[in-house]
Amino acid sequence: MHRVIRRGSSGLAPAYSARHVYPLAAASQSDLDTWHSLEFGRFGSSLAVKDGRYVISKGTGGRSSVSGIVATVFGCTGFLGRYVVQQLAKMGSQVMVPFRGSEDDPRHLKLMGDLGQIVPMRFHPRDDDSIKAAIAKSNVVINLIGREYETRNFTFDDVHIGITEAISRLSKQHGGILRYIQASCLGASITSPSKYFRTKAIADEIALRHFPQQATVLRAGPIVGTEDRVLNVWAQQAKGLPFVPIFGDGKTRLQPTFVMDVAAAIIAAVKDDGSSMGRTYDLGGPDVYEVQELVDLVFETIREHPRVVKIPLAIPKMVSIPRDYIMKKLRIPPISRSFYSSDFLDTVEIDQIVADGALTFKDLGVIPRPLRGVVIEHLYSYRTGGPGVGSTVGEHMTGIRF
Ligand SMILES: NC(=O)c1ccc[n+]([C@@H]2O[C@H](COP(=O)([O-])OP(=O)(O)OC[C@H]3O[C@@H](n4cnc5c(N)ncnc54)[C@H](OP(=O)(O)O)[C@@H]3O)[C@@H](O)[C@H]2O)c1
C-alpha cells in the first residue's frame, strides 16, 4: 500500500518555518512590527545597545567570551561565508547559519564556535517566514548571497535583487537589527553592460534604501584564497589543458583581494563605533593586475612555463548562445554552469578596481595583504612533484614523482 503525503493539505507551516515556534504570522502589520521589535522581549534581541554599540560583552574576546553580537549570515555556505562565520565565532558571537541544501552544507561551520554558538537553520529565500525565523534573535544581518550565473530556478534578478529585497525588508521590519552588511563587488554599476554587475548594484541600492542608517555595502574585488574561483580555475586549466585560454586582450584590470581581508573588513564594519554605517567601501588588494599578468603569476607559482592563447571574445560569445540555452533546460548540467557562460563572458572586459575617492580597507582599519605570499600559497598544491619541489620555473621536471 502506498502512503500518500499531501504537502500543505494539513495547513501546517513547513517544518523549517518558525511559525509554530514563534507567532510570526501576524494578524496585522502592527502585530508584526511589535513582535519583531525590541519592545517585545522574547522576539527582539535582549542585548543592550547604545549608539550602535553592543554594550553587553564578557570575557577576554576569545571563542568562549560573549561579544554581544548575534549575527545571521546569509550565504554562509559559500566561499566567503566560512571565513566570516569563523571570524565572528572566534570572538564569541552567536551565529545563525541559514542553509537551503543538504544538512551537510553548514556542517563545517559548526566546529568554528563554542558548543551551541553556531546554529544551522533551514531556510528558503522565497519563504519569508523562514527568513524571519533566521533573523528573529539576531542583532546583525550579513547578506553574502550571490551567484555568477543564472539557473533554471534563479535568475540574477531573483538572486541579487529579489533575495536582497526580502532579507533587507524583513530585517527592517524586525526592528532590532543594528547592523546590516551587504556583500557586493567592484565593477557593480547600474549602467554596466553585464547583468551580473547591474543586478549587484541594484541590490546595493535596495539595501541602503531599507537601511540608510545601518547598512554597510562592501564591494570586494575578485576574491582570492584556498577555495577561490579565479586563480584555481587558471591553475586547473594549466594542469589539464595544453594552454590557458584568455578571452579578449588580457588587459582587463583586476584588484584581487584576500578572502581573510574581506572577512576582516566585514567584522570591522560590524564592530566599529558606527562610522561605517550607511557607507559603501571598495575593497581591493594593494596591487592592480591585468588578467595576463595574473595568469603569468599562476604559471610562475605552479612552476610551469606560461602557455597562454588569447581568443577574441566574439568566438566564445557565439558558442555561449546555444550553450546557455541547453544548460538552462537541463535539470542536472553535465558541466559547471559558470564554464564560459554568456554571463561570465559579459564580465571579462570590465575592470574591477577601486574607484577614485572611494572608502577602502584603510578606512576600516584593515591592511590588505599583497597577492605574492600567503594569499597564493594554495596554488603550491598544483606543482608537479609536490608543493616543496623545485625553486624556479621549470624545475618541477626534476621533482620526485608520486
Ligand atoms: N568570489 C568572488 O570573487 C567575489 C568577488 C566580489 C564579490 N563577491 C560577492 O561576495 C558574496 C559571497 O561570494 P562567494 O564567493 O562566497 O559566493 P559563493 O561561494 O558562490 O556562495 C554564495 C552563497 O550564496 C548562496 N546562494 C546563491 N544562490 C542562492 C539562492 N538562489 N538562494 C539561496 N542562497 C543562494 C549559496 O548557497 P548554496 O550553497 O546553497 O548555493 C552560498 O551560500 C557574493 O555576494 C558575491 O557576489 C564575490
Image (cartoon, grey):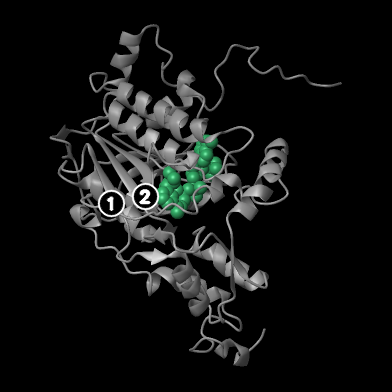
Q: Residue at x 46, y 23 (%)?
A: 128
Determine whether, in the image, residue 110 is placed left or right of residue 359: right
Along the line of sight, the residue nearer the viewer: 388 or 46 = 388
Instruction: Check contact, mark 2 vs mark 1: CB within 8 A.
Output: yes
Q: How many marks?
A: 2
Queried on whether the Cβ of the residue with tag 2 lies below 8 angstroms from ligand 1, the answer reads: yes
| Residue 354 drawn above or below residue 9 | below
Q: Secondary structure at mark 1?
A: loop
**Which residue, as the protein is rendered here, is positioned at the far right?**
1
Look at label 2 and name its amino acid.
Leu
Determine whether, in the image, residue 103 is placed left or right of residue 183: right
Look at label 1 and name its amino acid.
Ala
Q: Which residue is mark 2?
A: 186
Residue 255 image point, x, y percent:
36, 60
Q: Secondary structure at mark 2?
A: loop
Residue 329 image point, x, y percent:
72, 36
Q: Which residue is mark 1?
A: 355
Residue 172 image point, x, y percent:
31, 25
**Which residue, as the protein is rendered here, is positioned at the far left?**
51
Q: Residue at x 25, y 56 (%)?
A: 361
Mark closer to the chain start, 2 or 1: 2
Residue 308 in view of the camera: yes
